[in-house]
Image (cartoon, helix red, strand yellow):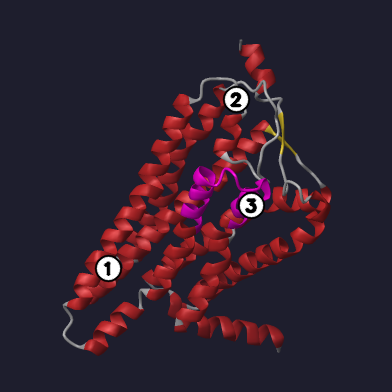
Amino acid sequence: MSQFQNITTSSIIFLLTGVPGLEDFHTWISIPFCLLYITALSGNSMILFAIVTQPSLHKPMYYFLSMLSTTDLGLSISTLITMLGIFWFNAREISFNACLSQMFFIKLFTVMESSVLLAMAFDRFVAISNPLRYATILNESRIGQIGAAVVTRGTLMLTPMVALLKRLSFCRSHVLHHSYCFHPDVMKLSCTDTRVNNAVGLTAMISTVGVDSILILLSYILIIKTVLSIASPEERKKAFSTCISHIGAVAVFYIPLISLSFVHRFGKRAPAYVHTMIANTYLLIPPVMNPIIYSVKTKQIRRVVIKILHSKIT
């Protein structure tokens, strides 16, 4: 049995899928995806560069934004090679271990993004409800601890989920239905009982992304309660305006995630390319949109980004 397991896991080669039914147009389809990757990588790199190089941005809110940009960069890079490899070179093969690694990092950066968004919600709550102690509560040491907790939490929650795939045997088709390794996709190909894997995977996602979404909602209930208690309408408007960028970031993270879940559950009659296109874009929407949202809605970031772009041009 041990020898059989080695043959069916360590030596197995999966075949990734581009856009089913539109293989002849892969080169053209790659153009918008390539532009999205360029936007995501350049936008988040610029945000990180601005925060690192500008002392005026060395504040809690921007430290959390730098964490968000780092996770967005990681999420983009995790799918970049396989997705564009399929579109440009029809490079569909991926080994089992490489598949596990890609799956782990996609899940890790997704969970980390959810955790960072929760930390940013807490940041906004502290800034609005206790502005005089804001810098004391969220000092650099505490922010570093939060960052370490984000990485540790994701790693501990997701390692068992990915490691348990090693126990599965694969005696069916080796064709995956996405251009990256998707956890449910891999389990569907197994001829071993996957109930334990399903339970561990569901528990990991509920206890991370699910719990985070509830806590973010509770944070905003408390923020709204605090804002409404402010006497001056002008001050209320000013306080709430500091949350607009974060609300946008939460929306571009959770809406595509929920949409993908609905399509997989209720859109079974939809053409295969619809599922694939949505699955491919949902991982790219947050990395593309977050730098745009924060550059447009945050004056300090916008000013520094314009300054950097102007220096590059001149």
Task: Quickly name the residue at label 1.
Answer: 125
Cβ atoms at labels 2 and 3 below 8 Å apart:
no
Q: Quadrant of the C terminus?
A: bottom right
Q: Residues within 10 Å of mark 1 (few under 14, many from 20)?
A: many
For residue 284, which quarter of the picture? bottom right
Q: Position of residue 22 (x, y in %)?
A: 77, 51
Q: Quadrant of the N terminus?
A: top right
User: Left of 91 or right of it: where is 173?
Assistant: left
**Closer to us: 298 or 173:** 173
Q: Secondary structure at mark 3?
A: helix
Q: Residue at x 52, y 71 (%)?
A: 52
- Residue 255 shown in magenta: no
Q: Position of residue 73 (x, y in %)?
A: 58, 59
Q: With respect to residue 153, does 130 lie above or below?
A: below
Question: What's the residue type where badge 2 is placed?
Answer: Ser
Question: What's the residue type where badge 3 is placed?
Answer: Val
**Closer to us: 293 or 59:** 293
Q: CA distance from mark 2 to mark 1?
A: 45 Å
Task: Quickly name the residue at label 3.
Answer: 274
Q: Residues within 10 Å of mark 2 (few under 14, many from 20)?
A: some
Q: Secondary structure at mark 1?
A: helix
Task: Quickly name the residue at label 2.
Answer: 190
Q: Residues within 10 Å of mark 3 (few under 14, many from 20)?
A: some
Q: Residue at x 50, y 78 (%)?
A: 54
Q: Residue at x 63, y 53 (%)?
A: 280
Q: Residue at x 19, y 77 (%)?
A: 228
| Earlier-in-chain disc, 1 versus 3 | 1
- Magenta residues span 256-281
Q: Which labelled disc corresponds to residue 225? A: none
Question: What's the residue type where badge 1 is placed?
Answer: Phe
Q: Nearer the viewer, mark 1 or mark 3?
A: 3
